[in-house]
């Protein structure tokens, strides 16, 4: 049975990210190979992966062809159109935001963390990247980046993690301010 995974901020081919994100690699090739190995150890060919942005700092195709699974990209700030277009059609879809339901859980996927999102007041979960583990989530939001998880992560693992985070306090957007 196929599974669904989430990840972000692999930054393939980006040497500076090693120092910026304090990654434990001595070179970009070591980082790239380690991330590819971790991905393929977890993801099967029929599994689906949603990558929440900042995939690579160069041609996407050279990395995508080595990664297993059916891959969807939620564009990040470093996913320039020329890099994405050069993937040879290996992304199943490319968008800036995605709404989906997995195993009965409504999800909102975006590269950037949001304070409110469609369905947040009804329990929808928001998955994001961009912050490289520096922005804490809550019981309904989670950074799925490799600097947090080291590899693509499945929803059941995310849901368990969310259960240990502070309860989300949903702002009442219907309240009127007395100014």
Image (cartoon, grey):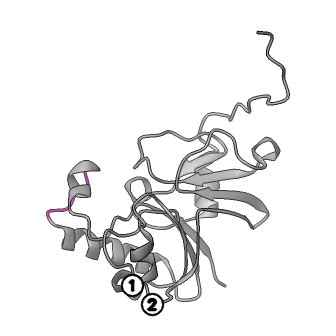
Q: Secondary structure at mark 1?
A: helix
Q: Which residues are magenta?
A: 21-26
Q: Secondary structure at mark 2?
A: loop
Residue 100 is left or right of residue 55, and the answer is: right
Which of 13/48 is in front?
A: 13
Quadrant occupied by the N terminus: bottom right
* Magenta highlight on residue 2: no
Q: Residue at x 50, y 56 (%)?
A: 144
Q: CA distance from mark 2 to mark 1?
A: 6 Å
Quadrant occupied by the C terminus: top right
Up-down relation of residue 13 to residue 156 (above or below): below
Q: In the rendering, at what x and y percent does residue 135 appear?
A: 47, 40
Which of 20/153 is in front?
A: 20
Read off the residue under disc 1: 61
Residue 177 is left or right of residue 51, and the answer is: right
* Residue at far top of view: 179
The crowd level at tag 1 (other Cα within 10 Å; few <14, some 14-19, many 20+) is some
Up-down relation of residue 3 to residue 28 (above or below): below
Q: Residue at x 64, y 83 (%)?
A: 2
Up-down relation of residue 175 to residue 36 (above or below): above
Specify the principal SS of the magenta part. Answer: loop
Q: Quadrant of residue 96?
A: bottom right
Read off the residue under disc 2: 88
Q: In the rendering, at what x and y percent does residue 143 appear?
A: 51, 51
Q: Quadrant of residue 92?
A: bottom right
| Labelled pair 2, 1 in contact (Cβ < 8 Å) | yes
Q: Residue at x 80, y 10 (%)?
A: 178
Q: Residue at x 52, y 56 (%)?
A: 111
Q: In the rendering, at what x and y percent does residue 25 appear?
A: 20, 62
Label 2 or label 1, whichever comes before in sequence order = 1
């Amino acid at each position: 049975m196929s599974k669904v995974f989430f990840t972000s901020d692999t930054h393939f081919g980006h040497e500076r990210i090693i120092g910026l994100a304090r990654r434990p690699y001595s070179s970009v090739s070591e980082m790239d190979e380690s991330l590819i190995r971790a991905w393929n150890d977890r993801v099967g060919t029929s599994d689906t992966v949603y990558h929440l942005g900042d995939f690579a700092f160069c041609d996407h195709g050279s990395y995508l062809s080595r990664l297993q699974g059916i891959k969807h990209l939620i564009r990040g700030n470093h996913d320039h159109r020329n890099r994405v277009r050069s993937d040879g059609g290996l992304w199943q879809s490319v968008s800036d935001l995605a709404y989906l339901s997995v195993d009965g859980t409504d999800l909102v996927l975006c590269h950037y963390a949001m304070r409110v999102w469609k369905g947040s007041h009804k329990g929808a979960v928001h998955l994001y990247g961009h912050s490289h583990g520096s922005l804490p989530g809550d019981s309904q939001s989670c950074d799925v980046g490799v600097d947090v998880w080291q590899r693509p992560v499945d929803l059941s693992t995310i849901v368990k993690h969310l259960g240990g985070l502070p309860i989300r306090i949903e702002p009442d957007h219907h309240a009127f301010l007395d100014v």
